[in-house]
């Protein structure tokens, strides 16, 4: 059984932006991943915002979706109650909507792991008490 890779904003931005401090790490992780990598609308929005000053950065994100490298399997509106609960629960660590979506996706894709550079995922829990398997750069 193939383990799904959930993709957070940081590794997506680092993969596209060669000036990002995690670019080499992201390139290495992407080379080992089997597409499609699963992500969400909020991650795409964050990545496009962060890449707005990178030449062709935003279009690179859209192209990854177009080529089937990235897949957006959930719709925010289908998970509003749960996302609102997560945002409220983790309000003290300022959880973003993208983070809440990644937590929700980790619940829906139970055999997945999350590629991230966000150490808050050491705090967040799926199904209220389970650690989220995450792939992070060394030292995070």
Image (cartoon, helix red, strand yellow):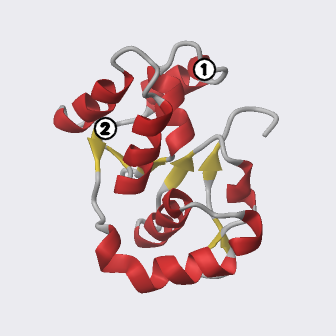
Question: Which mark, residue 97?
Answer: none
Q: Residue at the spot x=50%, y=21% of the render? A: 27
Callout 1 secondary element = loop
Q: Is residue 2 left or right of residue 125?
A: left
| Residue 120 visible in image | yes
Callout 2 secondary element = loop
| Residue 3 visible in image | no
Pointer 2 residue: 35
Q: Position of residue 28 (x, y in %)?
A: 54, 22
Pointer 1 residue: 20
Residue furthest to the left in view is 66
Is residue 46 placed above or below 32 in the rendered structure?
A: below
Asked where in the image residue 54 lies, by quadrant, the reply is top left
Could you tell me which quadrant the C terminus lies in?
Answer: top right
How many residues crowd mark 2 within 10 Å: few (<14), some (14–19), many (20+)? some
Q: Position of residue 66 (x, y in %)?
A: 17, 35
Residue furthest to the front in view is 53
């Amino acid at each position: 059984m193939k383990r799904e890779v959930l993709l957070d904003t940081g590794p997506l931005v680092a993969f596209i932006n060669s000036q990002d401090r995690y670019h080499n790490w992201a390139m290495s992780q992407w080379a080992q991943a089997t597409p499609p990598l699963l992500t969400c609308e909020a991650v795409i929005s964050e990545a496009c915002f962060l890449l707005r000053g990178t030449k062709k950065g935003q279009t690179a994100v859209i192209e990854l979706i177009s080529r089937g490298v990235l897949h957006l399997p959930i719709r925010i509106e289908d998970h509003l109650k749960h996302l609102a609960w997560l945002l409220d629960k983790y309000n003290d660590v300022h959880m973003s909507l993208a983070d809440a979506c990644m937590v929700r996706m980790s619940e829906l894709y139970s055999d997945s792991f999350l590629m991230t550079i966000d150490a808050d995922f050491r705090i967040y829990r799926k199904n209220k008490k389970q650690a989220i398997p995450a792939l992070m750069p060394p030292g995070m």
